[in-house]
Amino acid sequence: MLRGFTILFLALVTGLSARADRPRSPFGVEVTAGTGSVQVRFAVPAGCVLYADRLHFETADGTELTGASLPAPQTKLDAVTGHEKKVYGADFAAELPSPANFPGNWR
């Protein structure tokens, strides 16, 4: 089940798509399950950012995972919109509590 979570997570966070007309995502994501928690590490390439307001976590069945512990994002002027945005412009990790009813063994 962790594999299913990882695949859905990658699709949601990095915008991966089965459509051939979309370029491959430059972001790396690694999910590690521990006892009672899940750590999600993001590799953010130079010149790229992840928008903090678009970052969310959910399981393959659509259950939203809340309570993520994240580092503070940076505030940067978005070149496209001209507005200030909260972004992650370097590698970082999120720590999420495993939901009690999540299927699969996290150990």
Image: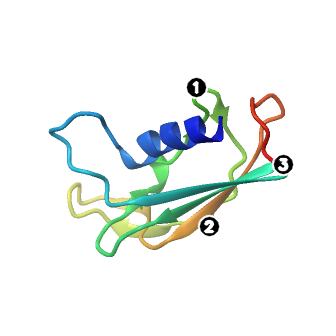
Q: Where is residue 50 in the image (x, y as percent from the top left)?
A: 41, 58
Residue visible at 50% across and 36% down in the picture: 8
| Label 1 sits on residue | 62
Q: How is the image coloured?
A: rainbow
Q: Which of 51 and 29 is in front in this view?
A: 29
Residue visible at 31% across and 37% down in the picture: 17
Side (left or right) of 104 relative to 44: right
Q: Do the residues bearing badges 2 and 3 touch, measured as CB atoms within 8 Å? A: no
Dot 1: what SS?
Answer: loop
Q: Position of residue 100 (x, y in %)?
A: 84, 33
Q: Where is residue 84 in the image (x, y as percent from the top left)?
A: 36, 62
- Mark 1 to mark 3 CA distance (whole Å): 19 Å
Among the 4 quarters of the image, the one containing residue 56: top right
Instruction: Using the image, tell me which numbered label, if any, was put on residue 36.
Output: 3
| Label 2 sits on residue | 71
Dot 3: what SS?
Answer: loop
- How packed mark 3 is, by other alpha carbons closer than 10 Å (few <14, some 14-19, many 20 or more), is few
Which of marks 3 and 1 precedes in the sequence? 3
Side (left or right) of 62 relative to 107: left
Label 1 or label 2, whichever lies nearer to me, is: 1
The number of numbered discs placed on residues in the rendered structure image is: 3
Q: Which amino acid does label 3 sit on?
A: Gly
- Mark 1 to mark 2 CA distance (whole Å): 24 Å
- How packed mark 1 is, by other alpha carbons closer than 10 Å (few <14, some 14-19, many 20 or more), is few
Q: From what the image shows, is residue 31 above or below residue 102? A: below
- Mark 2 to mark 3 CA distance (whole Å): 20 Å
Which of marks 2 and 1 precedes in the sequence? 1
Q: Which amino acid does label 2 sit on?
A: Pro
Q: Which of 51 and 107 is in front in this view?
A: 107
